[in-house]
Amino acid sequence: MVSARSADPRRSWHADEQGFITLVAISAARELVDDQRRNAEHEARRLGRLYAALSEANQALLRASTREALFQSICDAAVDHGGLALAWIGSADAQGRVHITAASGRQDCLDGLSFD
């Protein structure tokens, strides 16, 4: 078997005695590995942000003087450190309707929502 390299370093091709050329695409395997690495790095960053938010929420438990301040601090931590676009905490009244107690981030998403 005769072996030669293409101009693209991600591929190699081989010609047998009859002249049939077989292209071996190494790039697909490399792309798969690169995708897996990028996904793992993304997941590690996401988990790091969530851990930071959890840590901030734990600190809020120690610092907050009121229930409302605690809820607001937890929402702020989720957005500021957790990378969330919106965080909110609601409380149900005696009739079962949910009212937003604290919110942070894209609160415009909550406009017009009813939690009856």
Image: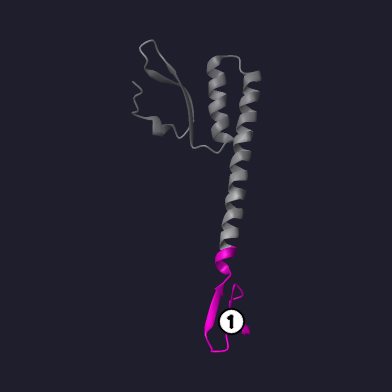
Number of other residues with Cα within 10 Å of mark 1, as a class: few under 14, some 14 to 19, many 20 or more: some
**Residue at image location 57% in from the left, 51% down from the top:** 39
Question: Could you tell me residue 29's position as x and y percent?
Answer: 58, 64
| Residue 25 figure quarter | bottom right
Read off the magenta span: 1-30
- Where disc 1 sits, the SS reads strand
Residue 20, placed above or below residue 67: below
Residue 66, placed above or below residue 6: above
**Which residue is the extreme one toward the bottom?**
18
Which quadrant of the rendered structure holds the N terminus? bottom right
**Residue at image location 33% in from the left, 28% down from the top:** 112
* Rendering colour mode: one colour
- For label 1, the residue is 14
Asked if residue 116 lies left or right of residue 4, the reply is left
**Residue at image location 45% in from the left, 35% down from the top:** 106
Question: Could you tell me residue 65's position as x and y percent?
Answer: 60, 14
| Residue 110 figure quarter | top left
Question: Could you tell me residue 20's position as x and y percent?
Answer: 52, 85
Badge 1 amino acid:
His
Asked if residue 68 lies left or right of residue 62, the reply is left
Relative to the observer, which residue lies in front, 57 or 15? 15
**Which residue is the extreme one toward the top?**
94
Residue 30, placed above or below residue 45: below
Which quadrant of the rendered structure holds the C terminus? top left
Question: Could you tell me residue 24's position as x and y percent?
Answer: 56, 74
Relative to the observer, which residue lies in front, 50 or 9? 9
**Residue at image location 60% in from the left, 72% down from the top:** 10
**Which residue is the extreme one toward the front?**
18
Q: Is residue 25 part of the magenta span, yes or no?
A: yes
How many numbered markers are drawn?
1
